[in-house]
Amino acid sequence: MEHKDVQASSTQEHEPVGQAVASPKQAPGEQDRLLREEDPSLLARAQLVQGRLPGHERIRIMRPSHSSLRRVGDGVLEATEASLAPRSGSERVTYRVKRFLIGSPLTNAQAAHERLTKFKALAVLSSDAISSVAYATEASMVALLAAGAMATGIVFPISIAIVLLLAIVAISYRQTIPAYPGGGGSYIVAKDNLGTLPGLVAAASLLIDYILTVSVSVSSGVQNLASVFQGLGPYVVAIDVALVILITIVNLRGIRESGSVFAIPTYFFIASAVIMIVGGLFKAYLIDHQPFMAAFHPPTGITGMEPVSIFLILKAFASGCSAMTGVEAISNGVPAFKKPETKNAAITLTWMASILATLFIGITLLAMAYGVTPQVGGNPTVIAQIAQKVFVGDPSHPGPLAFFFPIFQLSVLFILVLAANTSYADFPRLASLLARDHFLPHQFAFRGDRLAFSTGIVVLAIFASALLIIFKGSTDALIGLYAVGVFMSFTLSQSGMVIHWWRLRPSERGWQRKISINALGACTTLVVAIVIASTKFLEGAWVVVILIPILVLMFMSIHKHYRGVEGQRTTTVPGRAAEIKHLFIVPIAAMDRVSVQSIAYARSITKNVVAVHVSIDEGDTDKVRATWQDWATRLPSDDKTMLVVIESPYRSLYRPILDYIDSVKELYPEFTITVLLPEFVVAHWWEHFLHNQTALRLKAALLFRPGIVVTSMPQHLPSRIPDMAEVAELSGR
């Protein structure tokens, strides 16, 4: 504890202790500001100390020797970074590992600096949508293979239809951004305009989709890598999980840092894909003069037996709509942008839709030009086959760009893996909104050291890893679950926007145009959602259809619990201090110094104190009685402190005490009963096994007894506390 002595003049009229006395070096107002003890945030205490000579006095200002708190105003303290410093050896190891992995903690004031520029936001929030071009064309072609290899040529008009749908959805979400600058996610829009239940359905759909996005993106990326390095096949699942852990650690470092890490791979893939598309189309149509649609050769082991039907085309369309996943991410994440948020978000959404449409149509054209068909097991992938034909050509006579083939495949791996980052940006944010509204545990609303919603990030990683392990890293198996939830959320969001514009029609200019755009978006996405659910139901969509109502019921159950707790949380302790009548019960094992100190503390609050001793050994009980009688003779005559001995022939310790407490509570309901537990504090974990932990068991049992206040009096060993000597010295003064 720090001291500062301020000399006072002998002729000066001294103020009472706790008030400031002026010194020649400080203005009276300044000392008064420093020494006002009525402000507990001052963390300073003034003591009047008698000088050596008569009439000489001085004020001693005492401050804590070690404090991690900083005073920022009257009654306001701020915890500094020092408050996070570890205290023990194990804490120091954990702290250093944590700082190494996720970096130094950030303050709330630094949140504004963690926002994203358009350049970084495109990488963080659009990587899911842009990466889907790596497997969307293949997903449509796989469905069409059921009718034979030549049927895969229908993929081009299907891709055109998907791009038109993308344009409708993107324009619709551009209207959502300025209408909901705080984040126009499907949950918020549907809840505000359609009601709580539709909002929860949208939230459940999106949460499932975000988890699947991580699983599908990572598994697809690793499969592309395995197309180049065949020896990685047996280790696909292990690589999948390792990549999920890596992405999780990066995202725990904060959204801005993850944007910086992921921007380069995202733009490298975009550039590589553009080079492949431009170079491939130039080579196919201008150099080799290939027809618009080359001859498709069926892969080994697949013979198309199904006719080309409307159902088959719709199934291929539904599979190709996986290219649409992630389109809503920018609208959900408007608050993550730098100011002006809505303008930057709208521009980024336009960039994303344009890039996605260009790459998707370009890759489909290349598949048509080179007659590429999906292979059994997805190895090699369609995009890998296209890259090999464009960059390598004839394997016996590789072209000059053959070196770029493995580089391109690595860029595909990076974009697919980093596509999961979109989910890492939106899943925790959506979970925090649900937690704020009491539909998920409140832990999801807490920000971690780096201002990221750490609980949501970790939960997302756990579920995504579980899916990868269960489905053995197979993209084909996971893709069947995909896109159902996202189009359900699209429909609910756009329907909510229709209601939104209808309500604002008296004051909103151009509401007719806006409501028409969102109505078109709602209708088209509803049709697509029905198509996806029906055509992919047996392939796994049924799981999502069942999971959504289960999640909604879970949300409502959690909400009911929180509302019930909020409405019923109470205690029998009166709300006014004058109405509280105390009765202390102090369990004691012996009349030692700790017991005497505990009883003294209880007596300082009330005269109604009962010490309770459970008798297991008669010799110990006789000692307690004898010591008590000797000690009680020094108490005032009006003192009501009493000793109760409970004989326990069955050697039970804490159950007789609980029965006694329950009995007293029943007999004296007008009293507030406080159980004071002397509790020994061990210094090492293994020392717990050397003590019976009766106080801990009592505390746990009393937790579930309403109307009982439990107070712990910790017992520390001075040798284990470094500053105990100094504390003892100051106490003696």
Image (cartoon, helix red, strand yellow):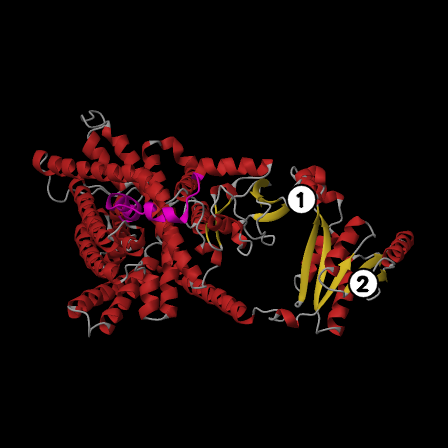
In the rendered image, residue 22, in percent from the top left (x then y), is placed at 52, 47
Residue 469: % across, % down: 46, 45
Residue that appears at 33% across and 68% down: 192
> Is tag 1's residue or tag 2's residue first in the polypeptide sequence?
1
Residues packed near mark 2 inside 10 Å, few (<14), some (14 to 19) or many (20 plus): many
Decide: is 33 above or below 530.
above
Tell whether 395 sits left or right of 444: left
- Nearest to the observer: residue 516 or residue 680: 680
Q: Quadrant of residue 483?
A: bottom left
Secondary structure mainly formed by the magenta segment: helix
Q: Within 10 Å of the Cα at label 1, are there few (<14), some (14-19), or many (20+) other Cα atoms?
A: few
Q: Position of residue 361 (x, y in %)?
A: 18, 47
Q: Which residue is labeled 1 in the image?
A: 54
Quadrant housing the N terminus: top right
Q: Quadrant of the C terminus?
A: top right
Q: What type is the residue that disc 2 sits on? A: Thr
Check disc 1 and give the amino acid type: Pro
Image coordinates for residue 722, horizontal then vertical, percent: 65, 37
Name which residue lies at 88% across and 52% down.
Answer: 620
**522 is within the stretch colored magenta:** no
Residue at the image point whose x is 38% and y is 54% from the top:
429
Question: Which residue is the site of mark 2?
Answer: 641
Q: Secondary structure at mark 2?
A: loop
Q: Nearer the viewer, residue 451 or 472?
A: 451
In the image, is 495 to the left or to the right of 425?
left
SS assignment at label 1: loop
Q: Nearer the viewer, mark 1 or mark 2?
A: 1
Q: Which residues are magenta?
A: 102-129
